[in-house]
Image (tube, helix red, strand yellow):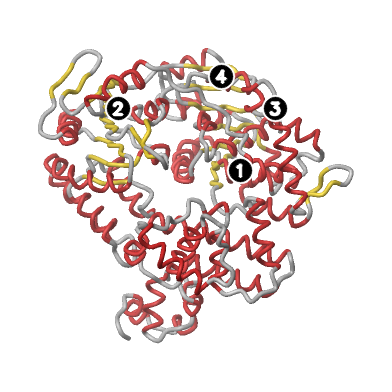
Amino acid sequence: METLLKLGYPEPNPLQKQALEQDYLGAGNCVVSAPTASGKTLLALKAIAENEGKSVYVVPLRALATEKKKEFKEALEPFGLTVGLATGELDSSSEHLREYDVVVSTSEKLDSLFRHKAPWLKDVSLAVIDEVHLMGDGRRGATLEMVATKLLDNGVRVLALSATIPNDKDFADWLGARLVKSDYRPTPLEIGVCDGEELEFASHSEKISGGRERALLKKALQENGGKGQALVFVSSRRNAESLAKQLSSTTEKFLTEPEKEACEALAENALNALGHPTGQCRALADCMRNGAAFHHAGLVAKQRDAIERGFKELRCLKAIVCTTTLAMGLDYPASWVLVRDLKRFNGAFAEFIPALEAAQIVGRAGRPRYDDRGVGVLCCTPHEKNEVKERYLSGELEDVYSQLSSRPLLRGHCLGLIAAGHCRDYDEIYSFFEKTFFAHQYGDARQLFSQVDDVVGELKEYDFVREKRGLVATPVGKRVSELYIDPLTAASFISFIQKNNHKKPFDYLMELANATESRPLVRAAKNEQKELWEECYSLLEEPDLHDPELLDKYKSAKLLNAWINEATEQQIMDSFGLPPGVVHTRARNSEWLAYSLQEMAFALNRTRENAEAKRLTRRIKYGVKDELLELCSIRGIGRVRARYLWRAGVKTGEEYRALSEEKRKAAISGKSI
């Protein structure tokens, strides 16, 4: 109880009381399975505060890591514990992290630290794995499972936090852990189904009129004496933007004068988040002025920060319309949560989202300390109503299954195990995989062994691994593992580097687009294919006409070419249909791939290719032509300001430093000096 008092919680809630009664901090591992906002984080903080060694806290996303680091730094300060953040560069052992008592990390970064054999990992005695149910996620699940298995293999005590899932006992049995299971919520949750005419709850029904979304939003904002807030989930970026615009006329009516002023300031921040505002920036600012916002992968960090502050801290933003794919990264409780689109396009047709995902989304309804209840509404058509009720209200949630059998993922993970010296022969690899959740779930790992054999054979073909009285990574193989790229990508890079032809800058961009990590590619529309074919023939020396993705790769390279030749975000939106947030994410990813290509060239002693890739890496980082690279290395000077300086005749760092403060301000604003 003393620890809870120090953490600012004099009285444990029912979940925390149950965990304490079950001695969740006993000598072994523990799985806590409970709804969103039930108080699982406090159990993690208590475990960390009372742990005698170093602790790591593993989260699925970088944004969540930043948020947790801030929260933990404040909470653990009374205990004299320091908190560090591990989300940055993957090609680093991040030695500075040894100085911290607690390290908050994404699973990818922690896995890369294992590959770099960071010495301080030996000091870790407690690992808290947040959102452990995401082991079933197709993109991130396998890495999370590998990290958890490595932690177990190192004898680290594990506290796993999970949403309410049917097979939480599977996780507990795998970890050899006690299971603390609870359905406690600080605010009761009511879930209704709305078919456009009627909003039906288990206890009662209400008629809906005047437009479903507006009517539901009005009810949400009337909650808690007119101080309610709502999250609305839709299937696409376009839907998010159009619906936010529609709903802003409703939210505007609920704003007080101080809230209008706060919204205006936030809108200005969102509008000016880029050097040159785009149409999307203006649309977002217009919504925010009226107390609404849209939130999707196309926003840049400054815009996301403004939305978060307006919704969580200032509470002047009354509604956020966001995509269902972004649900995992949003830690925003709301009075009401509306799932407008229960179906999502899978590439071929629209299908219902999983019941577990829907439960996670509506579980955000009900703000502790502000609301007496939370309301989740599932929207559908009248003819879908019975199916929706059966699927999401009466039906069972799906079990979480291991994603470890994916061959592309196994390639990188097997190389990582061998390169780090974790596994030195086939038997040790088999032994490692026998400890995974996959092996526990399916009875044994033998069905994985044939895939492991094939993958290791592939690594030998690439000369990343050799068999010498066991399995040993070659120097190049070790570097590939440290760079955290797919061995298939690395093999392609090596083949490209070793070609003795004259490589043009665009050839490098095509090679980056060819990487596994560049998926999804920018799709070539049917009406532009003829033009793109003509460009391919004129630009590429040897286009692979048998590659069904050639045009998509070419268009992806063309996008990157526009970025490094200083096309504005609006020009890129007009030409490629991609919003700034997506472009920036693709640029960051391509920067990492270009750096990896540079490192491969260095390892192969190819000076020319190394220099070209190094220059390209910096151009992608800043989004500029060659001549602006020196100016962009000056603190606070980005692509827009650098071009303004160049036009003003300031072309070097020395010339910039020689300017008076007044002339500097004028030059970086685009004024003549």
Q: Secondary structure beneath disc 3?
A: loop
Q: What residue did someone put label 3 on?
A: 445
Sooner in the amino-acid sequence: mark 1 or mark 4: 4
Q: Is residue 499 visible?
A: yes
Which class describes the residues within 10 Å of circle 1: few (<14), some (14-19), or many (20+)?
many
Q: Quadrant of the C terminus?
A: bottom left
Q: In the image, is residue 627 above or below residue 59?
A: below
Give the amino acid at mark 1.
Answer: Leu
Q: Which mark is residue 24?
A: 4
Residue at x 27% of width, y 37% of height: 232
Query: Mark number for residue 578?
Result: none
Left or right of residue 286: residue 471: right
In three-dimensional space, the C-alpha distance between marks 1 and 4, rounded to whole angstroms, equals 25 Å
Q: Nearer the viewer, mark 4 or mark 3?
A: 3
Residue 242's spot in the image, x, y percent?
A: 23, 47
Image quadrant of residue 555? bottom left
- Mark nearest the camera among 1 and 4 is 1
3D distance between C-alphas at marks 2 and 3: 42 Å
Classify residue 518 as left or right of residue 95. Answer: left
The type of residue carrying mark 3 is: Ala
Determine which residue is flagged by label 2. Answer: 366
**Measured from the top left, where is residue 301 in percent x and y?**
39, 53
Task: Name the residue beneath numbered marker 1.
Answer: 110
- The amino acid type found where label 2 is placed reads Gly
Q: Is residue 25 above or below residue 301?
A: above
Residue drawn at x 54%, y 48% is: 87
Q: Label 4, label 2: how many angstroms apart (C-alpha)? A: 27 Å
- Measured as percent of width and height from the top left, residue 558 is found at 46, 66
